[in-house]
Amino acid sequence: MITILGKAGSINVRKVLWTCAELALPFEREDWGSGFRPTEDPEFLALNPNALVPVIRDGDFVLWESNTIIRYLANRYGDAAFYPLDPQARAGVDQWLDWQATNLNNSWSYAFMALARHSPAHTDAQQIAASVANWEKHMRILEQRLQQAGSYVCGAQFTLADIAIGLSVQRWFATPLAHPDLPALNAYYARLSEREGFMLFGRNGMP
């Protein structure tokens, strides 16, 4: 039984939850993070000194960092279609996982905190506008990729990369801002929404 430590609303926890759903892995989840048990608690810090969710326990094995966790789960419990064994195909999946965790996440963080979370620390109009523009730039990169690749980020097959990318796409559509017409991205979002795991943990049951 996998134990997932982290609140269900965290985008990084949702990566792990959705991965477990795709792999039909049973799990237990403990609420940790803002509004729940504090991650500065010594019990949590003993598992992850960074005081960040998610953390998993798989028996006696403990692991943190969301993309590392989902790679581990795919390696241990998945198949070659979900996370390819071929070095070049796997590198393609890893490329988009890393792009989501770095370039894409950094583009939307300020705008999301301002427009969706209404954070009092994110009210600078120029920074909001710059973040929105940067976010749109990266979504256009994804649009171009989907036009080239087809159904999913790495081609015709749903892979681990679509979990990380799909959650960021959900955040894009859920944030109140002007969304340009990106037909491949729209079709991709609709395609992901046919997956039970995405509806449960990507869109959290929301239409």
Image: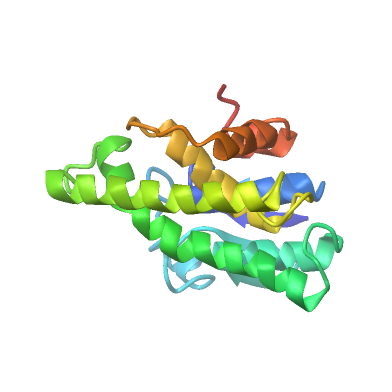
In the image: residue 52, left or right of residue 4: left
Question: Residue placed at 45% from the left, 74% from the top?
Answer: 49
Residue 3, compared with residue 202, is above or below; it is below
Residue 29 placement (x, y as % from top left): 63, 48
Q: Position of residue 75 (x, y in %)?
A: 79, 68
- Quadrant where the N terminus sits is bottom right
- Residue 80 sits in quarter: bottom right
User: Which residue is drawn at the image coordinates 51% and 59% (left, top)?
Assistant: 100
Of residues 2 and 77, the one drawn nearer to the viewer in this rendering? 77
Expressed as whole percent of the image width and height from the top left, the position of residue 51 reads: 42, 65
Q: Residue furthest bottom?
A: 87
Query: How many labels sit on residues?
Result: 0
Q: Residue at x 67, y 64 (%)?
A: 93
Give left or right: position of 20 versus 164: right
Residue 28 seen in the current view: no
Task: Note whether residue 104 is visible.
Answer: yes
| Figure quadrant of the C terminus | top right
Judged left or right of residue 139, residue 67 is right
The foreground one among 101 and 103 is 103
In the drawing, does residue 148 fall left or right of residue 99? right
Q: How is the image coloured?
A: rainbow
Q: Give the x, y percent position of residue 83.
A: 77, 63
Q: Which residue: 67% across, 68% down?
A: 92
